C-alpha cells in the first residue's frame, strides 16, 4: 500500500466513527492533532476511535481532537477533508438541532472566562510561531558564521532576514488581536504600527522621550484591543453614510493618542519588569524555580494554562533576543520520554502499549510529547506523575546553571527537545549553552526513567497491564467464547 493509500485509509476509518461527513462542521490540524468541529457530539464512537492503530488518543476542548502524531496528521487531514467533500451533502437540519444543545453544553463546560481569555491569547500568538522559528534559526546560523568568520558578505543579509520580523512583530500582534476580538484586523495593525514607528522618538510622555518599540508586543496587544472597542462604538453611533470615513479615522486617532501618551509607557514598564524578574528569579532561585517550572509544565499543558506564557516568551525574545523560560519548560518533554522508556521495559508482554511507545518516541525526542502523554503516561496515571518528576529535575539542572551565571535561552517558541538545539542562545559561548541544555535533557531522561521504573507502577497496575492481551484474545476465540477486543493503544485511566 502506498503512503497516499495508507493515509486515505486512516481518514476513511476515522470518518464513520465521528458521525460521518454530515456531522463535520470544520476540519483543521495542528502539529499532532486532527481538530474537528462536530454538529452532534453524541454520534462519536469514542472507544472504537481509540482502538484504531493510528489513533494515539483523543482530547476534547472547543473542538474534538484526535491525536495522530506529527507528520501523520499533516498527511491524513487533506485526505479526510477530501472524503468529507466527496460525501453526499445533506441539510441535516434536524441533526444540527439535536446536536446544538449538546455542543453548547460541552463548550460551556470548558469555557470558563479565564480559559477563554487564554485561548484568545494563544490565537493571537500561535500564528506567529512559524516566523519566529524560521527567523530564530537564521539568527543562530548568522551568529555561528560571524563567530567563525565565514561569509562576511552574507552575514548582513542574514541579519536583516532574522531581525526584520522581530522589528515589526508588534504590527502582526496588533493585526491578529483586532481580528481575534472582532474588529477590523488592519486597523489593529495600523494602531500597533505606531509603537515601532521611528518618529515616536520625537514625542515626550510621562516626562521622558519615547523609544521606538517601547511597550513591545504587550503594548501592541493593548492598543489593538482598545482600537476594537473604539471601532465598535463608532459602528453603533456614527451614521451609516459617514461610517466609511469617520470610523477608521476615529479608531486610529483615539486609540493612537492613548497608545502614545499612555499605553507605550505603561506596557514598557511592564515589559521591563517581566525581563528583570525573569533574570532575578533565575539568578537567585534558579534551581528551585527551574524545578517547579519543569515539574508543573505538563499539568499546565493539560489544563491549557501554558498559553498564558506565550506573551511572556515573546516579550523576553523581543527584549533579550531569547527566552530563558523555554529551555526549562522543555525539560518536561524529557521527563516524558524517560518515563515512556521505563514503561516499555516494565510491560514486556503488552505488545499494544509497546508499539505505541516505539512509534511515538521519535516524536518525543523532537519535543512533540502529546502521543506519549495521551497514548501512554496519562491513561496509566502514575507514569504521568513520574514524568513530571523527570521534568522537574531537568528544569532544576538548567536553573542551577542560571544561578551560576550561564543563561540558556531559545530565540523562538514552539520547538523543544532535540528540535530546540538550532534555536539555542545564551550569555556565554554557543558550545557551553548547548552542553548545559543537553545535560538538562539527559537529567530529565534519566530521572523520568528511574522514577517511573521504580515508583511508576503499583502491583495492581503492573498486574493489570503487563499481560499479553493479543495472545489471550486468540486463545479465547479458539475456544469459541465471545471476547472483548484486545487492549487498545490507549489504556483506560488507572488509579494513581
Image: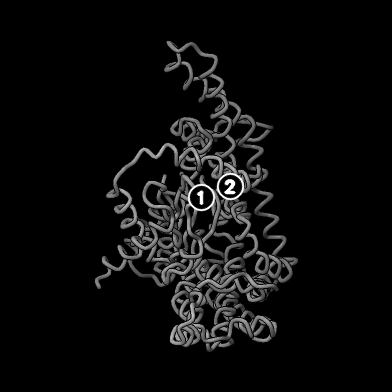
Residue 196 visible in the shown view: no
Taking the view exactly as shown, the residue that stands out farthest to the left is 2
Residue 400 visible in the shown view: yes
Which quarter shows the C terminus?
bottom right
User: What scheme was used to colour the molecule?
Assistant: one colour
Q: Secondary structure at mark 2?
A: helix
Residue 314 at what x, y percent from top left?
Answer: 55, 52
Q: Which label's residue is closer to the chain start, 2 or 1?
A: 1
Residue closer to the observer: 251 or 481: 481
Give the residue pinned by disc 1.
41
Give the residue pinned by disc 2.
106
Res 112 label: none
Q: Are marks 2 and 1 in contact (CB under 8 Å)?
A: yes
Residue closer to the observer: 417 or 344: 344
- Marks 2 and 1 sit apart, C-alpha to C-alpha, by 9 Å
Can you tell which quarter of the image residue 288 is in?
A: bottom right
Can you tell which quarter of the image residue 280 is in?
A: bottom right
Residue 325 at what x, y percent from top left?
Answer: 61, 62
Q: Is 223 drawn above or below residue 458 in the view shown?
A: above
Q: Secondary structure at mark 1?
A: helix
| Image side of residue 359 versus residue 462, left or right | left
| Image side of residue 280 versus residue 180, left or right | right
Amino acid at each position: 500500500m502506498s503512503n497516499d493509500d495508507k493515509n486515505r485509509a486512516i481518514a476513511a476509518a476515522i470518518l464513520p466513527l465521528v458521525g460521518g461527513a454530515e456531522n463535520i462542521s470544520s476540519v483543521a490540524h495542528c502539529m499532532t492533532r486532527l481538530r474537528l468541529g462536530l454538529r452532534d457530539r453524541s454520534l462519536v464512537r469514542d472507544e472504537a476511535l481509540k482502538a484504531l492503530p493510528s489513533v494515539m488518543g483523543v482530547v476534547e476542548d472547543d473542538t474534538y481532537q484526535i491525536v495522530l502524531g506529527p507528520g501523520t496528521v499533516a498527511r491524513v487531514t487533506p485526505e479526510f477533508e477530501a472524503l468529507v467533500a466527496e460525501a453526499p451533502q445533506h441539510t441535516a437540519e434536524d441533526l444540527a438541532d439535536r446536536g446544538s444543545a449538546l455542543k453548547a453544553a460541552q463548550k460551556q463546560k470548558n469555557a470558563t472566562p479565564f480559559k477563554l481569555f487564554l485561548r484568545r491569547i494563544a490565537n493571537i500568538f500561535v500564528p506567529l510561531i512559524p516566523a519566529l522559528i524560521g527567523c530564530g534559526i537564521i539568527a543562530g546560523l548568522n551568529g555561528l558564521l560571524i563567530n567563525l568568520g565565514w561569509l562576511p558578505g552574507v552575514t548582513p543579509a542574514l541579519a536583516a532576514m532574522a531581525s526584520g520580523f522581530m522589528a515589526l512583530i508588534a504590527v502582526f500582534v496588533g493585526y491578529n488581536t483586532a481580528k481575534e476580538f472582532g474588529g477590523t484586523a488592519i486597523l489593529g495593525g495600523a494602531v500597533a504600527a505606531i509603537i515601532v514607528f521611528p518618529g515616536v522618538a520625537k514625542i515626550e510622555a510621562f516626562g521622558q522621550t519615547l523609544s521606538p518599540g517601547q511597550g513591545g508586543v504587550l503594548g501592541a496587544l493593548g492598543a489593538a484591543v482598545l482600537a476594537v472597542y473604539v471601532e465598535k462604538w463608532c459602528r453603533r453611533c456614527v451614521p451609516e453614510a459617514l461610517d466609511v470615513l469617520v470610523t477608521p479615522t476615529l479608531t486610529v486617532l483615539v486609540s493612537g493618542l492613548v497608545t502614545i501618551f499612555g499605553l507605550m509607557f505603561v506596557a514598557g514598564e511592564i515589559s521591563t519588569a517581566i525581563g528583570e524578574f525573569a533574570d532575578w528569579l533565575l539568578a537567585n532561585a534558579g534551581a528551585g524555580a527551574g524545578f517547579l517550572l519543569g515539574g508543573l509544565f505538563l499539568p499546565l499543558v493539560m489544563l491549557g494554562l501554558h498559553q498564558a506564557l506565550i506573551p511572556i516568551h515573546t516579550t523576553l525574545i523581543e527584549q533579550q533576543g531569547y527566552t530563558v523560560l523555554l529551555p526549562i519548560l522543555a525539560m518536561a518533554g524529557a521527563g516524558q520520554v524517560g518515563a515512556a522508556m521505563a514503561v516499555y521495559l516494565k510491560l514486556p508482554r503488552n505488545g499494544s502499549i509497546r508499539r505505541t511507545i516505539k512509534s511515538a518516541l521519535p516524536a518525543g525526542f523532537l519535543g512533540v510529547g502529546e502521543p506519549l502523554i495521551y497514548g501512554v503516561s496519562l491513561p496509566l496515571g502514575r507514569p504521568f506523575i513520574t514524568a513530571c518528576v523527570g521534568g522537574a529535575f531537568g528544569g532544576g539542572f538548567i536553573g542551577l546553571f542560571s544561578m551560576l551565571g550561564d543563561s540558556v535561552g531559545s530565540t523562538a517558541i514552539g520547538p523543544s527537545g532535540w528540535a530546540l538545539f538550532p534555536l539555542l542562545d545564551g550569555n556565554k559561548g554557543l558550545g557551553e549553552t548547548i552542553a548545559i541544555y543537553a545535560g538538562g535533557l539527559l537529567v530529565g531522561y534519566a530521572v523520568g526513567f528511574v522514577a517511573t521504573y521504580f515508583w511508576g507502577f503499583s502491583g495492581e497496575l503492573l498486574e493489570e497491564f503487563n499481560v499479553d492481551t493479543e495472545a489471550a484474545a486468540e486463545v479465547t476465540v479458539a475456544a469459541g467464547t465471545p471476547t472483548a477486543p484486545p487492549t487498545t493503544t490507549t489504556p483506560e485511566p488507572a488509579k494513581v
